[in-house]
Image (tube, helix red, strand yellow):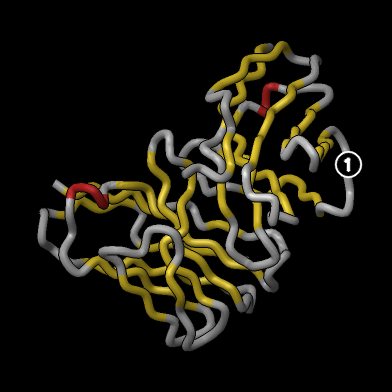
């Protein structure tokens, strides 16, 4: 039982490059989330989805896009990476709005 | 504007003693609160939750207390064990599925 899996685990990008982070969950959860964690800032919500085909903005959505074409996958895209997007990114999912969220292991992204 | 605050970045406690982690919030509309634990290089894992209709919730060694009038919640760990050493995040929501997280408190339990 894999739970929530994030790909890749580490990545270094040059400023201006693009990339996609993949989140996959095998628990048939409706809700999925992308967070970023920065020192002294805690976890901040970037985008979220309340079901297949839906996405919505969180606290810090600028510079990111997302897609949820399949229920089990939630993709986070950076079209033109900036050093300010250097962070650890976490994906999470839960079956209903008030249930505990299950987190992936994180993706450490460095933009140089 | 930080709606959920964990004012203590770190805390050290002797093994076997009580650990008390605190969390303050400013939004009176928050009605559901959770605590997560995070080890290095891992994602956060759920620990315990509490609804605003309660003032206490207990699960084994972990108890969360909620003081709505003070907009304050705390997590008590008794007795503390070395394996409890981690970063603890509190999170709050206001009737929705969007959670606002605090900045975390690093707990170190000394053997």
Q: Is residue A36 left or right of residue B7?
A: left
Q: Position of residue B67 (x, y in %)?
A: 81, 38
Figure check: A89 above or below B75: below
Q: Give the residue at x 57% y 27%.
A: B7
Asked if A62 appears above or below B109 in the picture, the reply is: below
Q: Quadrant of residue A60?
A: bottom left
* Quadrant in which the N terminus of chain A appears: bottom right
Q: Residue at x 52, y 79 (%)?
A: A72
Q: Position of residue A84 (x, y in %)?
A: 23, 48
Depth check, front residue: B32 or A85: B32
| Residue shown at the point (56%, 57%) measured from the top left | A103
> Which residue is more in the foreground, B64 or B59?
B64
Per the image, the residue denoted by label 1 is B56
List x then y, in percent, for residue A51.
Answer: 56, 83
Q: Considering the numbered disc 1 on the image, is that residue within a helix, a strand or a loop?
A: strand
Query: What is the count of numbered marks?
Result: 1
Circle 1 marks a residue in which chain? B
């Amino acid at each position: 039982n894999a739970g929530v899996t994030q790909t890749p685990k580490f990545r270094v990008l040059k400023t201006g490059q693009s990339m996609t982070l993949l989140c996959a969950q095998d628990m048939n959860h409706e809700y999925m989330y992308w967070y970023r964690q920065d020192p002294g800032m805690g976890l901040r919500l970037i985008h979220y989805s309340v079901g297949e085909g839906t996405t919505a903005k969180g606290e810090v959505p600028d510079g990111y896009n997302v897609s949820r074409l399949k229920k089990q996958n939630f993709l986070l895209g950076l079209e033109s990476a900036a050093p300010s997007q250097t962070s650890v990114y976490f994906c999470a999912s839960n079956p209903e709005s008030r249930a505990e969220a299950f987190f992936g292991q994180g993706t450490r992204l460095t933009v140089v | 504007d930080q709606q959920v605050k964990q004012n203590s970045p770190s805390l050290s406690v002797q093994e076997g003693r009580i650990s008390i982690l605190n969390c303050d919030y400013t939004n009176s509309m928050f009605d559901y609160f959770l605590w997560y634990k995070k080890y290095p290089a891992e994602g956060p894992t759920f620990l315990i939750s509490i609804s605003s209709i309660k003032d206490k919730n207990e699960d084994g060694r972990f108890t969360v207390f909620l003081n709505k009038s003070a907009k304050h919640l705390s997590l008590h760990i008794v007795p503390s064990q070395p394996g409890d050493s981690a970063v603890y995040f509190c999170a709050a929501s206001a009737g929705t599925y969007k959670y606002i997280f605090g900045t975390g408190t690093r707990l170190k339990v000394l053997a």
